[in-house]
Amino acid sequence: MQDLVTRHLDSQQALQILDIGSYDVNGSYKPLFPHANWRYTGVDLSAGPNVDVVLSSPYRFPFPDGHADLIVSGQAFEHIEFFWLTWMEMVRVLKPGGRIFLLAPSRGPEHCFPVDCWRFYPGGYTALAKYAQLELVEVTTDWEPHPDPDSAQWGDSVGVFRKPPQDFKTALKQRLRYYLHQKLISATGL
């Protein structure tokens, strides 16, 4: 995440940043966003360290459309049963021109918290970008074991996504997609 912040963000630009899955279990991304003009908000399902907003559902965010300039999420998507619904909420609250930094495991042992459902590869990130009509700026995957024996079993896919500017027709189609997603969520009781 530090590498992405260094390479993709301008410290002079004012940013509204959301961290999805921010509960500090063994570290936090918050220190990576120290600038006074960067407003960081930690979002998770449980109250606790580094959580500013507690969600009642991982599929509904209490933010308006186009709220955030940057959304980060690290090591959370494997724990979301229907991650594509969360993904569409992230895209909904992202401003046109905004970015998403997504880190999710490509390998590693099962670690239920409370569930562990998924692993992600570059093709999966390409599919997420296509599904939400985002630009996939970059994607990398840790294929080789980490040199540290405690971390050797773990690997991540890291992606940077950008929401393109939208004309009226595209924005209307996107809004309809979000509406249909929310209807699906409501109909299934998620």
Image (cartoon, rainbow, N blue to C red):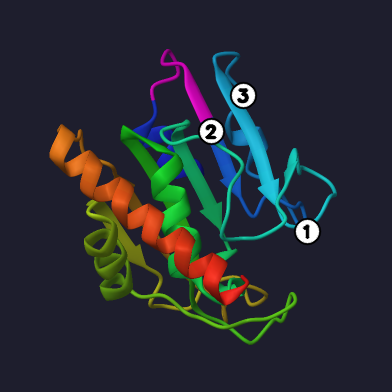
In reply to whether residue 56 is colored magenta, the answer given is no
Q: Residue at x 58, y 54 (%)?
A: 60
Left/right placement of residue 100 relative to residue 123 reads right
Mark 2 vs mark 1: in front: 2
Q: Which mark is residue 12?
A: none
Q: Position of residue 82 (x, y in %)?
A: 51, 74
Task: Report the residue marked by disc 1.
Answer: 25
Q: Earlier in the sequence, mark 2 or mark 1?
A: 2
Mark 1 or 3, nearer chain start: 1
Residue span colored magenta:
10-16
Percent coordinates x, y for residue 117 in the rendering: 57, 83
In the picture, measured across the screen, residue 73 lies left or right of residue 164, that is: right
Q: Nearer the viewer, residue 71 or 177?
A: 177
Locate residue 90, reporting x and y percent: 46, 50
The 10 Å Cα crowd at callout 3, few under 14, some 14 to 19, many 20 or more, is few
* Residue 4 percent coordinates (x, y): 41, 43
CA separation, marks 2 and 3?
Answer: 11 Å
Residue type, label 2: Ile
Residue indicated by mark 2: 17
Q: Are marks 2 and 3 in contact (CB under 8 Å)?
A: no
Above or below, comparing residue 91 to residue 5 in the picture: below
- Mark 2 vs mark 1, CA separation in Å: 20 Å
Q: Which mark is residue 34?
A: 3
> Measuring 56% from the left and 39% from the top, which residue is drawn there?
18
How would you rate the neighbour count of disc 1 (Cα within 10 Å): few for under 14, some for 14-19, many for 20 or more?
few
